[in-house]
Image (spheres, rainbow, N blue to C red):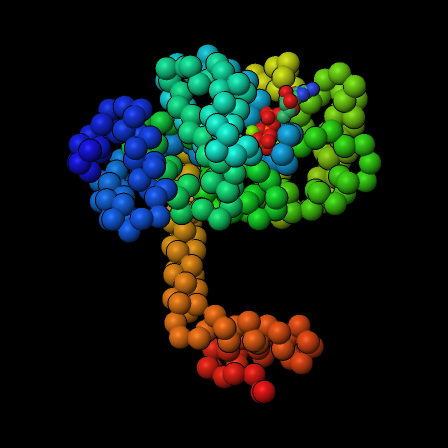
Amino acid sequence: MEVQALFSAIRRRERHALAQGITLVESTRSEDRIKADQLLSLVLPYAGNSFRLGISGIPGVGKSTLIEALGGELLRSNPQLQLACLTVDPSSPRNGGSILGDKIRMEELSRHPQAYIRSSPSGGYGGGTAATTQETLLLLEAAGFNLCVIETVGVGQSEIEVSTMVDALLLLLMPHTGDEIQSIKKGLQELAQFIVINKADGELREAAQLTQQRMLSAFKLLAFNGEPLPEVHLCSAQQGSGIENLGRNLIQFSKSQRQSGATAKLRVKQMQQWFAREVSNALSKRFFGEGDNQQRYLQWEAELVAGKLTAGAAARFLFAGHLPPA
Ligand SMILES: Nc1nc2c(ncn2[C@@H]2O[C@H](COP(=O)(O)OP(=O)(O)OP(=O)(O)O)[C@@H](O)[C@H]2O)c(=O)[nH]1
Ligand SMILES: [Mg+2]
C-alpha cells in the first residue's frame, strides 16, 4: 500500500493497515525506514492524545491476565474507550506461540470491537526497542486509540525505559512474605504511580494483604518532598477482584493529569528523552562503525579488566585515538 493510502486507512482505524504500519516502523530495512518516516510525519499531527499506561512486572506475575480483566472492565464502564495494547509474548514466534499465547490469555479483549492487541515476541516491546515502541504509540493514537497499554517484562532496565514513554506506570507484584519488600520499595515510588499486588486469592490472599500493609507503612515512613505517593492496590486478575476499583482510579488519574496540564508537560519531557536516546544511540553506532574503534575498545577493556587503569582513563585514551602500550 502507498504511504498516503496507508495513512488514510490507519486514520479510519482499519486493522490490517495498522498492523502493516507497525510492521513498517519495526522493520530494520533501510527502504522501509524511508516509508516509515513518511508515514510518521503524516500521523504526527494526530498523535499524542491517549492515556499511555505501562504495565510492568516479572514473568508470570499476571500482566496479560490483568490486561484482559482490566481492559474488559474499562470497556464496559467507558463507552468512548478505544483500547490498544502492545504485549510481549515470551514464547518464540517460530512455534506460533506468540499469537496463540495471547489469544488464550486475552480472549475477550482480542475479540472486542473497540480493542486492538499487537503482540510481539520478547525483545520486542521489552527494552532495547524503545524507539519502535514510541513510534507504534504514535500510529495507535492517530488511529484514535485513547488508551494505550504497553506490557513489558520487568527486569529493572525495561521498567525505567518504559517509564520515560508512558503517562503512568503500573507495577504488578507477587504477594511477598518477608523482607523483600524493604529492598523493592526503594525507587519504586519515583517510577510507578500504581503498585498492584496480584494473585490476592486462594492461599496467597493473606500474604497479599500483608504485602499491601507493609508497603503502605513503608511508604508512609519515607519523606517524598511532597511528591504524590503511588497507590497500592490488591487484586486477583484471575477472579476479577479489585479490578473495578483499579480501573476507576486509573481513569480518575488520567483525567486529573490531563486537566492539571501534567500530561502536556510530560509529552515535552518524553520527546526530549526520546531525542536524547536517539542521539546517543546514533553517536555510539557511528563511533563503533569507524576505523578500528571496535577493536581498540576491546583492547582498552582488557587493560581495564587487568586492573591497569580506571574506566574513565580508558575511555579518555580510547577517544583520544590511542592504543594500549604493547
Ligand atoms: N491465582 C492466580 N493466578 C493468576 C492470577 N493472574 C494470573 N494468574 C496466573 O499466572 C500465570 C501467568 O499469567 P500471565 O498473565 O500470563 O502473566 P504475565 O505476567 O503476562 O507473564 P509473561 O507475559 O510471561 O511475563 C497464568 O497461569 C495465570 O493464570 C491471579 O490473580 N491469581
Ligand atoms: Mg504476558
Q: Is residue 6 above or below residue 102?
A: below
Asked whether residue 126 is in view, the answer is yes
**For the point 67% across and 81% down, which residue is it?**
308
**For the point 81% across and 40% down, which residue is it?**
179
Q: Is residue 312 above or below residue 189?
A: below
**For the point 34% across and 36% down, which residue is it?**
22
Q: Is residue 119 left or right of residue 105?
A: left
Image quadrant for the N terminus? Answer: top left
Asked whether residue 193 is in view, the answer is no
The residue closer to the viewer here, 77 or 69, is: 69
The residue closer to the viewer here, 36 or 206, is: 36
Residue 202 pos. (x, y %)? 75, 16
Q: Is residue 217 above or below residue 83?
A: below
Image quadrant for the C terminus? Answer: bottom right
Residue 62 pos. (x, y %)? 62, 26
Q: Is residue 210 left or right of residue 127?
A: right
